[in-house]
C-alpha cells in the first residue's frame, strides 16, 4: 500500500510512519505541490494525506481505482475537491480537534501584548525612542472585558486563561445557551452588546458565507475607540480595509492578527507598517506538541479506513450512498 503525502510543514514523517508502516503502508512524500507532480505520484496510492496542497479532481482521479481515503492535516477543506471525492465514493476526513490549547495560548499572548503595548514599545526602542509617553494610555488588564465571537473548543480554552488575568469574559455564538455559558464561567450575549462593551474582541469562528467579512466598517464602528481586535481564526472574517481605516481614524486602539486575507501579505501592506498592530505568521496552531498530535490523528484516520473502520471525523458521510450506486 502507498499513501501520497502532498505536503507537510514539519521536519519529517516519522510519526506517520509509526502509525502506517504497522499496516504495511509506505509513504510517498511529494517533492513539491505542483498539480502535475501530485498527479504523477498519486497513481497506485490507496490514500492521500494533504496539508495545504491543492488536491484537485485530477489528483484524485489519478489515484483511482486504488484510492480509499483522503485526510486533511487540519480543519479547513478548501484545498480538497471534496465533491469529486464524494462522487467517486472516497471518504474524506480532517483533524478538527487539535491545537486548541496552542491557539488559546497565542490569543492570550496577543491580548497581553496589546494591553501592555509590548510590540509597540519594542518597535519604538529599536528606532531609538525610549519614550513611555508614546505608548500611553496604559490600562490595568484586571476588570476589563474580553468578548469571544464564536464559542467552540478554542474559545473555551481561552476563557479560563482570561479569567485568571482578571478579565470578565462574554461570548456570542448562535448555539450558546446562557446555561452553557455559566458552566464555562462566561456570560452569553448578543453580538451588538459584545462589540459595544468589550475592551478586547477575539474571533474564534470558522470561515463561512455567514461569517466572512463580519468584522466590517459597521461592526468596527460599534466598538469602543479604546478597544482592540484579535484574530487567530481566519483572515477573511475581517474587512481589512475597514480595519485599516478604523486604526487610522483612531476609532479602534489596536489589533493583533495571526491570520490575514492574503498570506503572506505584501511587503508594503499598510497594516504591517502600523505600530498599533501586532502580527504573527499564522503561527497560533504551532507547537511541538500540537504537530505531533496533528500527525498522529491524521495518520490514524487513514489507518482506520484502510483497515475497514470508519474515520472519526468524516466530512462527507454521503460518500457511502454514492459508493453503493
Image (spheres, rainbow, N blue to C red):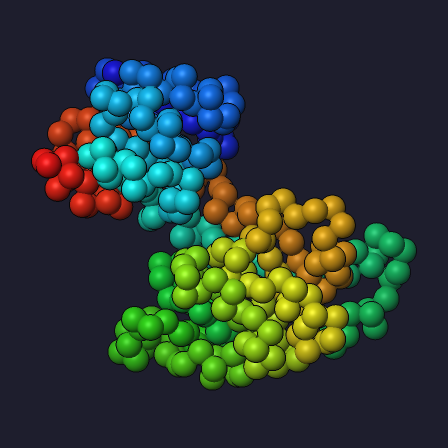
Residue 284: x and y, percent? 52, 50
Q: Residue at coordinates 54% horizontally, 69% vertically from top-left? A: 215
Q: Is residue 216 visible?
A: yes
Residue 124: x and y, percent? 82, 59
- Camera-side residue of 185 and 180: 180
- Camera-side residue of 184 and 196: 196
**The N terminus - image quarter:** top left
Q: Is residue 22 visible?
A: no
- Camera-side residue of 96 and 45: 45
Is 275 on the left-hand or right-hand side of 111?
Answer: right
Residue 83: x and y, percent? 29, 42
In this rendering, is residue 285 above or below 308? Answer: below
Rendering quarter of residue 21:
top left
Q: Residue at coordinates 41% horizontally, 81% vertically from top-left? A: 190
Residue 239: x and y, percent? 58, 64
Question: In the image as oriented, which residue stretches furthest toward the right?
Answer: 128
**The C terminus - image quarter:** top left
Q: Residue at coordinates 68% horizontally, 78% vertically from top-left? A: 251
In this rendering, is residue 102 above or below 14? Answer: below
In this rendering, is residue 255 above or below 289? Answer: below
Q: Residue at coordinates 87% horizontally, 62% vertically from top-left? A: 130
Amino acid at each position: 500500500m502507498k499513501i501520497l503525502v502532498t505536503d507537510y510543514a514539519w521536519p519529517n514523517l516519522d510519526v506517520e510512519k509509526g502509525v502506517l508502516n504497522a499496516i504495511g503502508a509506505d509513504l510517498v512524500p511529494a517533492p513539491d505541490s505542483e498539480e502535475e507532480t501530485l498527479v504523477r505520484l498519486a497513481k497506485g496510492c490507496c490514500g492521500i494525506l494533504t496539508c495545504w496542497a491543492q488536491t484537485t479532481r485530477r489528483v484524485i482521479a489519478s489515484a483511482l481505482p486504488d484510492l480509499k481515503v483522503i485526510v486533511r492535516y487540519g480543519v479547513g477543506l478548501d484545498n480538497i475537491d471534496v465533491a469529486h471525492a464524494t462522487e467517486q465514493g472516497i471518504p474524506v476526513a480532517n483533524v478538527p480537534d487539535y491545537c486548541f490549547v496552542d491557539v488559546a495560548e497565542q490569543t492570550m499572548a496577543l491580548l497581553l501584548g496589546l494591553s501592555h503595548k509590548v510590540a509597540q514599545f519594542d518597535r519604538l526602542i529599536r528606532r531609538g525612542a525610549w519614550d513611555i509617553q508614546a505608548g500611553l494610555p496604559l490600562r490595568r488588564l484586571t476588570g476589563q472585558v474580553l468578548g469571544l465571537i464564536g464559542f467552540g473548543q478554542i474559545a473555551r480554552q481561552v476563557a479560563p486563561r482570561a479569567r485568571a488575568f482578571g478579565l470578565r469574559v462574554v461570548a456570542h455564538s448562535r448555539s450558546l445557551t446562557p446555561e452553557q455559558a455559566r458552566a464555562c464561567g462566561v456570560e452569553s450575549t448578543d453580538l451588538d452588546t459584545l462589540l459595544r462593551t468589550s475592551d478586547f474582541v477575539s474571533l474564534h469562528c470558522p470561515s463561512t458565507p455567514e461569517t466572512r467579512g463580519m468584522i466590517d466598517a459597521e461592526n468596527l464602528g460599534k466598538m469602543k475607540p479604546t478597544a482592540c481586535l484579535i484574530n487567530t481564526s481566519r483572515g477573511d472574517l475581517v474587512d481589512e480595509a475597514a480595519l485599516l481605516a478604523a486604526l487610522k481614524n483612531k476609532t479602534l486602539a489596536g489589533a493583533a492578527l495571526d491570520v490575514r486575507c492574503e498570506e503572506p501579505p505584501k511587503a508594503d501592506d499598510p497594516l504591517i507598517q502600523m505600530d498599533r498592530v501586532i502580527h504573527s505568521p499564522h503561527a497560533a496552531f504551532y507547537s511541538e506538541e500540537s504537530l505531533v498530535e496533528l500527525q498522529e490523528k491524521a495518520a490514524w484516520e487513514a489507518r482506520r479506513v484502510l483497515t475497514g473502520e470508519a474515520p472519526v471525523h468524516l466530512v462527507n458521510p454521503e460518500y457511502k450512498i454514492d459508493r453503493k450506486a
